[in-house]
Image (cartoon, rainbow, N blue to C red):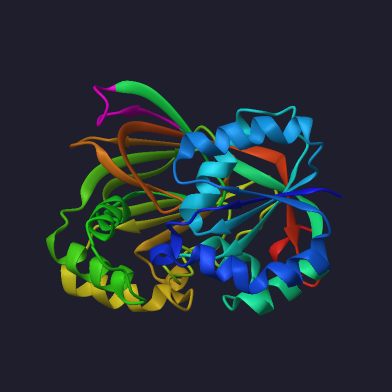
Amino acid sequence: MRTLIIINPNAAGGRAGDVFKKIEDRLVEVLGEFIVAVTRRPEEVAEHLDAAVAAKVTHLIAIGGDGTNHTVINELAKRPELDLTFGSLPVGTGHDWARSLGIPSDPEAAVKWLSRAQAVSCDLGKVEYIDTLQGRQKAARTFLNIASAGVSGEVDARVNRSRRRTSLTFLRATVATLFQYKPQQITVDCDGKPFYSGSSYLVVVANGRCFGRGMWVAPQALINDGKFDVVLVEGMPRLRILAALQTVFSGRHLKRSDVHHTLAAEVFVHSKDTPLGMDLDGEEAQGQDLRFTLQPGAVKVLVDPSSETLLGI
């Protein structure tokens, strides 16, 4: 086994490099020989993946947050010939993919988790849309954890404008945005059949379970069942949406009559109003006519074998 470790030094307010130094010796014990690549820009990830072929790398570990994972997965998706097993050590603001997999936030504990982890096939999602931020050009992005449209895109924009991010940044941004956001008129089709038409705060297309720094928006999602968990929140009065927000942290929102849930391998979302803000693994985007398709078993990921509840087995 030979491993490429990609470090995003900008993650966690610039602390990722320091975290790596603290766990480097332990990583040698767990992984054996590895190559370290420090990437400050997304295009540098592509360069390191191309070099990984010559180096006969078999495993790739990303040290960073959900944004780092998103960049790496999108570059891997462009190189299907690379048979790499992907793993991550969470250092970042959100690290919701780590929460979905049960990876500890403490670096030392995360390395111990990694020592037990085994490769399993994992689904990926792909979203194709009209990118209204780039002159209405057609665009496509791959996502590992969760993609969503509606208020979450506005929350991302607000978080990205924050100069300093803390554990409360996402929550504050969410509450502030809910007070200002106007639910949009959308239609949603799932596997070619009408699912919803009307006012909506949010539609979530989930492979993983958690987003927004700890919101268990899709608590029943499985990463290898060949289906998205689709969760839609209707438009409603602001006081009611704030009450609904509290239930997302425990997953109880799925019991509400104004929250809809289904499984699907293909989801089409059309906004009758203005373009929809999007959240793609925590990364901000904006578009219209969104088509989500599932790619079953598209990547191998490292998972603790005791995490049977995450897998469709």
The location of residue 269, given as percent across then percent down, is: 38, 37
| Number of numbered callouts drawn | 0
Identify the residue at horizontal 74%, vertical 66% (top origin).
27
In this image, 160 relative to 267: left or right? left
Q: Choose between 169 and 256: the one closer to the eye.
A: 169
The residue at 38%/67% (across/down) is 257
Q: Is residue 41 left or right of residue 136?
A: right
Image location of residue 271, percent across then percent down: 27, 37
**Res 266 seen here:** no
Q: Is residue 268 above or below residue 21?
A: above
Viewer-side residue, 305 vs 217? 305
Does the magenta portion include 131? yes
In the image as oriented, which residue stretches furthest toward the left? 180
Residues in magenta, as a range: 128-136
Quarter assignment of residue 61 = bottom right
- Could you tell me if residue 88 is visible in this image? yes
Would residue 179 be found to the left or right of residue 37 on screen? left
- Residue 118 image point, x, y percent: 82, 60
Q: Please state the horizontal and vertical placement of residue 246, each as a whole percent of the image.
A: 35, 78
Image: 304 above or below 197:
below
Decide: is 231 above or below 296.
Answer: below
Q: Is residue 103 magenta?
A: no
154 horizontally vs 125: left or right = left
Quadrant showing the C terminus: bottom right
